[in-house]
């Protein structure tokens, strides 16, 4: 017994110690994994007890810290500290003392409202800090004299939505390695600071309500590559000298003139959603390396000659959603790299014969174009993809010249006809979209070497013999055949091609098909009818069974009460016979003639059954009025007879059975009579 105890004890101790050593320590309310401790959504005001002393990632978001917890200094291994969504108002002088490995610090959504509440040495120990986020604190300004942000290692500083109204250049003075500065969503109206930084690459000033920007702001940011200034809805003009800049986003502002300045390295400029009305000549002369230019969703109605002059490397120009109605033919003549031009949603009435040796993709959808010349594409010898969808073209020219055109979208126009010569001068054409036009007929010869074609949603005339070649070509070459409906003649209106013309195109198939369909339909109908009948029968039987069961239950109950009554009656009679002579003994039996005149005994003679009730009521077992019980009996009988006639045979048998059993006293008078005789 002692041996057993020792063994058990050892096992217990072993398991406890292994447990202790294998699971990392985890504070209450926290979730710990390998090197990550998640203490979100507690009500901590102090650091919890029992944190892993070697913790590297600590998430304290959504707690109730009023200041940076002082015990943090006991965790010098911390690399990543999240203090967002707390109520921190001050950061003491030694707030992050000893956190010499800290790289990432999130202080977003706190209540820091004054740079003076941040100790000037708060970040003295964090010599590895690279990411610092103060976003969504009501700071209202940037530090001036006593700047606590003296962090040589810092690379990313976020100050989004901090209610900052004025910027000054001090903020980045002591951040020699800062690469990204985020100042989005601050109500900065005027930008005049002369920032100086040789490391800053990324500047976010989006949604800042900027109205005026001094021309020297970006001059001494020698490494600046990206400017985000979108959604400054009151910004009317922009000037910027920045030889290093690569990406400029000024979309959804209120610019009226093209941003200018010395911008020799910008490769992408986004001016979507501004208020340009006109593009003057030489507007982009200084954008010598621009590759992508977005001018969509403006109000441009005219573009001067040579407007895009100097854009020697431009590849994509987006002019969609403007109000252009005509263009100078040689507007893009000098842009020798231009491959993509989007002019969708403008107001051209004709397909302009633009000159461009390099253009490959041209989008002219939704432009109200109604006429096209056969030579409208000959000065774009490299054009591969042309989108003319949703225009009002009713006629495609014969011998339309486009040697390189591969894909043509003329869907949702009003084209009435394509003939043998329409695409005859487009030897490279492989893809045509003619969906949603007004074609009534077409010959397969019209489509040359087209591989992919869409002719759905046209008002086809199902004149079967003349439609047959097109149908055969489509089906033989495996082309799209869906949504091909007839509109005329009237007898075929709304029918799919195949069902309208099958009789003529596939007579043999039709007969077999119809027989097959007929027999299948018949079999299916028979099965359905059978199923319905079976289901109804089953339902009827179930219902019947339920009624029968209810009836039987009622009967047994009745029988029970009757038996009880009978017992009482018997007792009563016994008592009566003991106490008094049977009244029938006093009567003389009827003579033979009298007996013949007596009414024949019926199985349910009311006087007999009544006798039971009168006896029962005399003893008032049920405590009911004898008149009521006398009346109750025949009524019940009538109801029963009614149900007998409406129910099945079995039910009636049950009724009969219960009748014979429910009047068990009926033979009794006879036996008494017999015994009398
Ligand atoms: C945490 O551990 C994972 C896997 O062991 C590692 O990849 C990651 O770098 C660690 N994180 C820190 C901050 O040490
Ligand atoms: C913490 O790390 C040190 C050194 O890496 C190690 O000696 C110690 O056991 C670790 N402590 C825990 C609880 O993991
Ligand atoms: C800090 O926590 C908040 C809330 O969970 C989260 O949104 C944020 O991304 C975290 N910060 C970092 C840097 O992971
Ligand atoms: C910016 O902060 C204000 C309050 O300071 C808040 O109402 C607003 O929703 C914030 N904006 C965003 C986009 O978070
Ligand atoms: C800013 O740049 C301009 C010229 O680009 C130069 O004259 C000026 O000294 C620079 N300012 C600072 C503070 O470096
Ligand atoms: C183009 O840049 C030069 C300096 O390189 C500048 O003087 C001129 O004003 C700029 N032009 C435009 C239209 O911005
Ligand atoms: C052209 O611009 C329109 C409207 O901005 C856009 O919907 C369409 O996708 C663009 N076309 C291409 C080919 O990108
Ligand atoms: C052509 O333009 C229309 C309308 O903008 C668009 O729906 C369609 O997808 C475009 N077609 C091609 C092939 O890009
Ligand atoms: C189209 O060309 C075919 C032969 O290539 C010819 O039989 C047919 O008549 C032509 N149709 C028209 C309308 O020119």
Image (cartoon, rainbow, N blue to C red):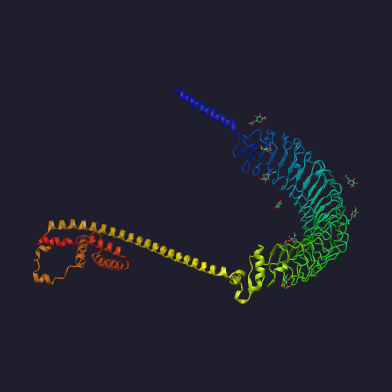
Q: Position of residue 139 (x, y in %)?
A: 74, 47
Could you tell me how many numbered marks the image carries?
0
Q: Position of residue 163 (x, y in %)?
A: 75, 50
Quarter holding ligand 8: bottom right
Whether residue 351 is visible, yes or no, is yes
Query: Which quarter of the figure has residue 419?
Result: bottom right
Whether residue 67 is visible, yes or no, is no
Determine whether 115 is above or below 531 in the image. Answer: above
Q: Position of residue 46 (x, y in %)?
A: 64, 38
Foreground residue among 128 and 173: 128
The residue lying furthest to the bottom in this view is 490
The residue located at (76%, 44%) in the rendering is 157
Determine whether 152 is above or below 640 in the image. Answer: above
Query: Which quarter of the figure has residue 570?
Result: bottom left
Is 388 on the left-hand or right-hand side of 214?
A: left
Foreground residue among 337 and 539: 337
Query: Which quarter of the figure has residue 116?
Result: top right
Foreground residue among 190 and 585: 585
The residue lying furthest to the top in this view is 2
Is 110 on the left-hand or right-hand side of 42?
A: right
The residue lying furthest to the front in this view is 508
Which quadrant: the C terminus? bottom left
Q: Position of residue 24 (x, y in %)?
A: 61, 34
Which quadrant: the N terminus? top left
The residue located at (9%, 68%) in the rendering is 590
């Amino acid at each position: 017994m002692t041996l057993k105890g020792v063994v058990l004890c050892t096992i217990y101790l072993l398991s406890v110690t292994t447990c202790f050593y294998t699971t990392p320590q985890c504070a209450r309310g926290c979730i710990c994994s390998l090197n990550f401790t998640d203490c979100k959504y507690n009500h901590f005001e102090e650091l919890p007890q029992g944190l892993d002393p070697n913790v590297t990632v600590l998430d304290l978001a959504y707690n109730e810290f009023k200041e940076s917890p002082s015990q943090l200094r006991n965790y010098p291994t911390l690399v990543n500290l999240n203090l967002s969504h707390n109520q921190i108002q001050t950061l003491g002088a030694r707030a992050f003392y000893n956190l010499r490995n800290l790289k990432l610090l999130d202080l977003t959504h706190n209540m820091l409202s004054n740079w003076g509440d941040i100790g000037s040495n708060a970040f003295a120990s964090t010599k590895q800090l690279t990411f610092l986020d103060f976003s969504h604190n009501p700071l209202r300004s940037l530090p001036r004299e006593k700047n606590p942000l003296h962090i040589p290692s810092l690379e990313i500083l976020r100050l989004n939505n901090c209610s900052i109204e004025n910027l000054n250049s001090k903020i980045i003075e002591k951040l020699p390695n800062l690469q990204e500065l985020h100042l989005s969503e601050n109500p900065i109206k005027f930008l005049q600071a002369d920032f100086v930084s040789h490391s800053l690459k990324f500047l976010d000033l989006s949604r800042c309500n900027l109205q005026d920007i001094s021309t020297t702001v970006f001059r001494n940011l020698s490494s600046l590559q990206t400017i985000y200034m979108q959604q400054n809805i009151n910004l009317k003009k922009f000037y910027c000298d920045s030889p290093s800049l690569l990406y400029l986003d000024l979309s959804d502002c209120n610019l009226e003139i093209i941003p200018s300045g010395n911008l020799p390295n910008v490769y992408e400029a986004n001016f979507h959603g501004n208020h340009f009305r006109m593009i003057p000549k030489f507007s982009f002369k200084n954008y010598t390396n621009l590759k992508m230019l977005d001018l969509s969703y403006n109000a441009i109605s005219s573009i001067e000659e040579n407007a895009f002059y100097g854009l020697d490397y431009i590849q994509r120009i987006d002019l969609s959603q403007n109000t252009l109605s005509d263009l100078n033919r040689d507007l893009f003549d000098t842009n020798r790299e231009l491959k993509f031009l989007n002019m969708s949603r403008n107001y051209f009435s004709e397909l302009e014969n633009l000159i461009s040796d390099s253009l490959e993709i041209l989008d002219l959808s939704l432009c109200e174009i109604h006429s096209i010349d056969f030579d409208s594409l000959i000065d774009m010898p490299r054009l591969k993809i042309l989108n003319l969808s949703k225009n009002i073209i009713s006629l495609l020219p014969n011998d339309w010249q486009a040697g390189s055109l591969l894909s043509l979208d003329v869907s949702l126009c009003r084209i009435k006809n394509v003939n043998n010569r329409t695409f005859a001068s487009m030897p490279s054409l492989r893809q045509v979209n003619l969906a949603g036009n007004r074609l009534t007929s077409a010959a397969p010869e019209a489509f040359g070497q087209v591989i992919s074609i869409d002719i759905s949603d046209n008002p086809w005339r199902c004149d079967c013999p003349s439609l047959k070649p097109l149908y055969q070509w489509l089906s033989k070459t495996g082309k799209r055949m869906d949504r091909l409906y007839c509109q005329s003649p009237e007898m075929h209106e709304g029918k799919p091609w195949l069902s309208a013309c099958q009789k003529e195109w596939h007579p043999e198939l039709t007969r077999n098909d119809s027989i097959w369909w007929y027999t299948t339909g018949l079999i299916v109908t028979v099965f359905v009818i059978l199923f319905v009948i079976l289901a109804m029968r089953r339902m009827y039987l179930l219902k019947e069974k339920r009624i029968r069961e209810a009836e039987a239950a009622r009967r047994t109950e009745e029988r029970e009460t009757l038996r009880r009554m009978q017992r009482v009656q018997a007792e009563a009679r016994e008592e009566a016979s003991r106490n008094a002579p049977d009244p029938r003994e006093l009567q003389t039996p009827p003579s033979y003639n009298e007996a013949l005149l007596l009414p024949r005994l019926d199985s349910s003679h009311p006087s007999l059954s009544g006798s039971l009730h009168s006896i029962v009521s005399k003893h008032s077992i049920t405590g009911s009025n004898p008149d009521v019980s006398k009346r109750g009996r025949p009524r019940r009988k009538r109801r029963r007879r009614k149900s007998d006639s409406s129910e099945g045979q079995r039910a009636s048998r049950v009724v009969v059975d219960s009748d014979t059993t429910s009047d068990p006293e009926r033979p009794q008078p006879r036996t008494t009579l017999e015994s009398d005789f």
